[in-house]
Image: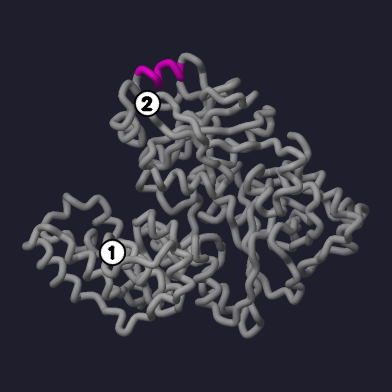
Amino acid sequence: MRFLIDTNILIALEPAGNPALHANTDRAAELLSLVHAGGHTPMLHPASHVDIGRDQDPTRREQVARLATKYAPLSMPPRPSAQMITAMGGPFDENSNDWVDCQILSAVALNAVDFLVTEDHGIHRKARRVGIADRVGSIQDVIALLQALLPRIRTAPPAVNARPCYSVDESDPLFDTLRRDYHGFDEWYKRCKLAGRPCWTIEDARGLCGFAMVKPETDPVGITLGRALKVCTFKVAERAAGNRFGELLLKPIFDYAFANGHSHIYLTTRPGNAALVAFMADFGFQQVDARADGGDIVLLKRTVPSTDDTEANDPLSFHIKFGPPRVHPNAASAAVVPIRPEYADLLFPETSPELPLFAGVAACGNALKKAYVSRTKTRSLAAGDLLLFYRSGDVRGAVAVGVVEETRVFSDADDALLWTGKRTVYSRDDLAQMLPSAIFVIKFRQTRALAKPIPLDELCARGLVSAPPQSLVRVPALSIQWLRNLTNASY
């Protein structure tokens, strides 16, 4: 596979004699090691030399330009189409930053390379705009993908622990950046401890990997919201990036909000925190016209839709804006999806009869955005369709519900893994074993893990299936309302 490295990755890899200046050098070196270990090719787009040429330090500029020659150049790169330039907001002045971004993203869109590695949030934003976000990743995203391509030794990531915040050691290194960025952090955290605010932690032998704390409020931030849940702190340690711990922390936050009848969830952040803003937007948080104390921006998510919201949103958009677990009350199509126990343990670890809550053994199990892979011949699924996952073997019952985002059929294992790399439990070898049959991939969002499995006899009695499903089974129209009610039921 061919991995195009952006200029910011090159600078981290080739710090021109002063690695202390580049916080990403160690992770970038790990990335490059995995690229070579897998027999892949790191490449550099000619447009990156325009970025290099902007360095005002002539000595460093020359050093980086020379070091860049170690990487295979992308010869005769494809030119961006007029449609792509327009979609990205162009036309652009030649050699401008936007022009460089457009050239590099065109190489991905037109399949000159398999994947682009970049830490530039602007490029990630543009990639989403032109529909290639799943082929553009951060250093840690691509490290996770490359590790999946290697022989895999599965180890369980740590569980999420629900606890009062006074039981958390605030001297943990995870709090260092919060302490640096927010004046008076220690005094504020002391007040939180005295109030006994609830929080969730993810931990390993080195300390905290993730931390989230919430505070129930009424009419906060100067907006009439009613009963709202403020996410006071939401932090994943940099060393833990790529494990989908951010999504793992969102799971108990959403559960808490719905179980306690909060009509809104909100948080505040600095205007320059583009990564957090983009991440939260993917789960229905929108920036509102309000400013918190200190000039922070407010990101708000509603959990209770109006009748107008139901009519104005398609099933997938509705779920993103108001779930999980909520789904569109008029979702018109659904399917029962069989999943073997060993894959259910990875994809839905919180439903496993053997593992503790949220102790997933793969990053995709931590996530809310997942992928299901099969060889089924029933492929007529559309965005917003409901999925009821049936665990065969030991449980013989439904364990989780999802909402379809997108589906594709592949005849090549590398292509399938490239499309699902951030979400799947499968390695390349797993996918290759499905060939020569076509590989059917469903990208979906988990709406909820069921507290208790729904046994096969009840699924049959309610008309969803007539026997243990061996492949994807469409749910009859008369049974879909029951499935919608199951998902939207109050906690």
- 50 and 390: which one is in front? 50
Measured from the top left, where is residue 196 in percent x and y? 51, 18
**Mark 1 or mark 2, earlier in chain:** 1
Q: Residue at x 15, y 60 (%)?
A: 55
Query: Which quadrant does the N terminus fall into?
Result: bottom left
* Picture quadrant of residue 370: bottom right
Q: Amino acid at mark 1?
A: Ser
Disc 2 crowd rating (10 Å Cα; few below 14, some 14-19, many 20+) is few
Q: Which residue is mark 2?
A: 294
Q: Residue at x 57, y 74 (%)?
A: 431
- Is residue 173 shown left or right of residue 215? left
Q: Which residue is mark 1?
A: 96
- 70 and 128: which one is in front? 128
Q: Residue at x 62, y 32 (%)?
A: 264
Query: Which quadrant does the C terminus fall into?
Result: top right
Q: How many marks?
A: 2
In the rendered view, would you say 29 is above or below 368? below
In the rendered view, would you say 346 is above or below 407? above
Q: Is residue 190 magenta?
A: yes
Q: Nearer the viewer, mark 1 or mark 2?
A: 1
Instruction: Mark yes or no: residue 51 visible.
Output: yes
- 385 and 473: which one is in front? 385
Q: Is residue 288 magenta?
A: no
Magenta residue span: 187-193
Residue at disc 1, secondary structure? loop
